[in-house]
Image: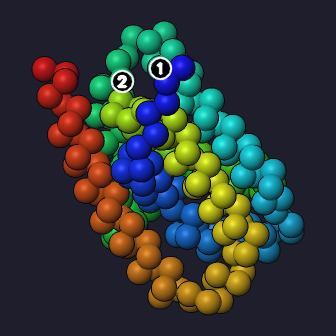
Amino acid sequence: MEFHFDFKEIATATMVLFAVIDILGSIPIIVGLRNKVGHIQSEKASIVAAVIMVAFLFIGDEILSLIGIDVNSFAVAGSFIIFFLAIEMILGITLYRDDAPESASIVPIAFPLIAGAGTMTSILSLRAEYYVENIIVAIIINIIFVYLVLKSSKKIERLLGQTGLSVIRKVFGVILLAIAVKLFAANINQLF
């Protein structure tokens, strides 16, 4: 078996997933959940999110082919989801709202906050363009970062403040918007 590790692909996939997961922008949600339900199991949430993402990386294609959708169509649809996530981040509006949970570690932290619809869409969209091993490395890098943020969310909130978190969220929103446009342009030609 031959591996195709590529630093550029790893860096790009890492940034895409980092922007989509938006763990820094989720710190207020995480802190609110921690205050509401008590202790959040950072290790458990991180491991479950990683398993979900890697599993979807491998079986996502089979699920799509089972329902008759090709990866390029999914990538174009995913570009729309990423586009709307970026709009939410940049404009500070909420297009999708999930009900408040009663427990926190697996639902909603691992799923759908970390490994949600945007992340799944991004993983399959990345799979259409990059080698699987590079995406797995990007997932691992992001999960390590997610774990660190979950472990120290209160310290990060105090350090950055609301303004700092807002600026970071908007910057990654613009990056996501550019990624959505690139995914759309790269895959729309494959459909026609």
Query: Does residue 42 lie above or below 161 as drawn?
Result: above
Q: Which is more N-terminal, label 1 or label 2?
A: 1
Asked whether, in this view, residue 133 is left or right of residue 7, the answer is right
Amino acid at circle 2 = Val
- Tell me, yes or no, if residue 69 can be seen here: yes
The x, y position of residue 49, in whole percent, is 67, 45
Residue 48 lies in quadrant:
top right
99 vs 110, nearest the viewer: 110
14 vs 76, nearest the viewer: 14
Amino acid at circle 1 = Asp
The residue identified by callout 2 is 71
For the N terminus, the quadrant is top right
Q: Residue at x 52, y 35 (%)?
A: 133
Q: Are marks 2 and 1 in contact (CB under 8 Å)?
A: yes
Q: Residue at x 81, y 62 (%)?
A: 40
How far is mark 2 from mark 1, CA to CA? 7 Å
Label for residue 142?
A: none
For the view shown, which residue lies furthest in the front direction? 2
- Tell me, yes or no, if residue 116 can be seen here: no
Query: Does residue 35 lie above or below 97 as drawn?
Result: below
The crowding category of the residue bearing disc 2, from other C-alpha atoms within 10 Å (few below 14, some 14 to 19, many at least 20), is: many
Q: Residue at x 73, y 75 (%)?
A: 152
The residue identified by callout 1 is 61
Asked whether, in this view, residue 145 is left or right of residue 61, the answer is right
The x, y position of residue 59, in whole percent, is 56, 21
Q: Residue at x 60, y 38 (%)?
A: 53
The x, y position of residue 66, in whole percent, is 48, 10
For the C terminus, the quadrant is top left
